[in-house]
């Protein structure tokens, strides 16, 4: 390719908080139509998840410690699970999209999620004091869950590094770039790279 044939890429401006949430909730095309998520959308959505959980735990504190209502135990687990569906789904979809934007397969995230879920199966055994473990299978479960958590930690670090990378310019295996365009800047929607 000649130097004169190279494309000149221009970066679009960063998404605002509201634009990022709108793009996250309206842009999902399903597993057959994966989308790419740029860094500004990703970090704005991660901020929204932190704010969501801060409000949730503040309300729980008010209900439990200030007003004296008992929302612990099974009721608390059920409430927390119901209120976690949306932010966990948002987290998963944004991470998948961020991996796609840097041209990485979403199996990297599955390498984090699967060992984490499998490792939690042995958590009740891990809460036993060392002297009360009565069978070798308890020790094997504790060791296996520790290895699974270690694997999940390694994949979490790898995925985090991928999420820090800049968007691929141009089209990759998952579609056109949501950040870069070859159109010359005409208005404030575009800014030079």
Image (cartoon, rainbow, N blue to C red):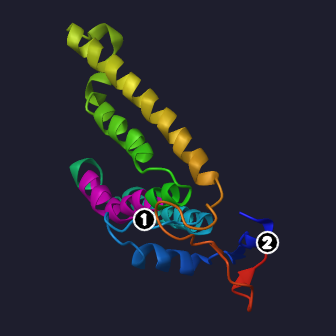
Do the CB atoms of the residues marked 2 and 1 lie less than 8 Å apart? no
> In the drawing, does residue 174 fall left or right of residue 17?
left
> In the drawing, does residue 3 fall left or right of residue 30?
right
> In the drawing, does residue 100 fall left or right of residue 163?
left
* Image vertical order of residue 4 relative to residue 190, above or below: above
Find numbered disc 1 in the image and state the secondary structure of the residue it sits on: helix
Q: Which of these two is toward me, 85 or 171?
A: 171
Label 2 Cα crowd, 10 Å radius (few <14 / some 14-19 / many 20+): few
Q: Main secondary structure of the magenta part?
A: helix
Quarter of the rendering containing residue 133: top left
Foreground label between 2 and 1: 2
Give the residue pinned by disc 2. Answer: 4
Find numbered disc 2 in the image and state the secondary structure of the residue it sits on: helix
Say which mark, if any, is on residue 59: 1
Q: Give the residue at the far front of this rendering.
A: 2
Label 1 Cα crowd, 10 Å radius (few <14 / some 14-19 / many 20+): few
What is the magenta range?
76-94
Q: Earlier in the sequence, mark 2 or mark 1?
A: 2
Residue 68 x, y percent position in the rendering:
35, 58
Q: Name the residue at 24% across, 15% down.
A: 138
Q: Which of these two is toward me, 98 or 104?
A: 104
Q: Quadrant of the N terminus?
A: bottom right
Does residue 99 appear in this view? Answer: yes
Residue 55 x, y percent position in the rendering:
47, 66
In reply to whether residue 176 is colored magenta, the answer given is no
Distance from Cα at disc 2 to Cα at disc 1: 60 Å
* Image vertical order of residue 50 relative to residue 9, above or below: above
Q: Name the residue at 48% across, 63% down.
A: 49
* Image vertical order of residue 114 relative to residue 61, above or below: above
Q: Name the residue at 42% across, 51% down.
A: 106
Q: Quadrant of the C terminus?
A: bottom right
Does residue 134 appear in this view? Answer: no
């Amino acid at each position: 390719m000649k130097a004169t044939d190279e494309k000149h890429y221009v970066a679009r401006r960063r998404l605002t908080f509201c634009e990022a949430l709108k793009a996250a909730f309206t842009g999902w095309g399903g597993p057959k139509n994966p989308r790419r998520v740029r860094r500004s959308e990703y970090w704005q959505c991660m901020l929204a998840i932190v704010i969501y959980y801060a409000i949730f735990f503040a309300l729980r504190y008010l209900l439990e410690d200030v007003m004296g209502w008992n929302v612990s135990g099974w009721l608390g687990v059920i409430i927390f699970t119901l209120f976690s569906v949306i932010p966990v789904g948002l987290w998963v979809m944004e991470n998948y999209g961020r991996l796609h934007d840097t041209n990485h397969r979403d199996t990297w995230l599955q390498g984090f999620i699967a060992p984490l879920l499998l490792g939690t199966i042995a958590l009740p055994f891990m809460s036993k004091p060392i002297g009360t473990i009565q069978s070798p299978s308890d020790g094997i479960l504790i060791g296996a869950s520790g290895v699974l958590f270690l694997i999940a930690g390694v994949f979490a670090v790898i995925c985090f590094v991928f999420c820090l990378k800049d968007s691929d310019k141009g089209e990759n295996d998952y579609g056109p770039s949501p950040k870069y365009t070859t159109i010359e800047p005409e208005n404030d929607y575009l800014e030079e790279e």
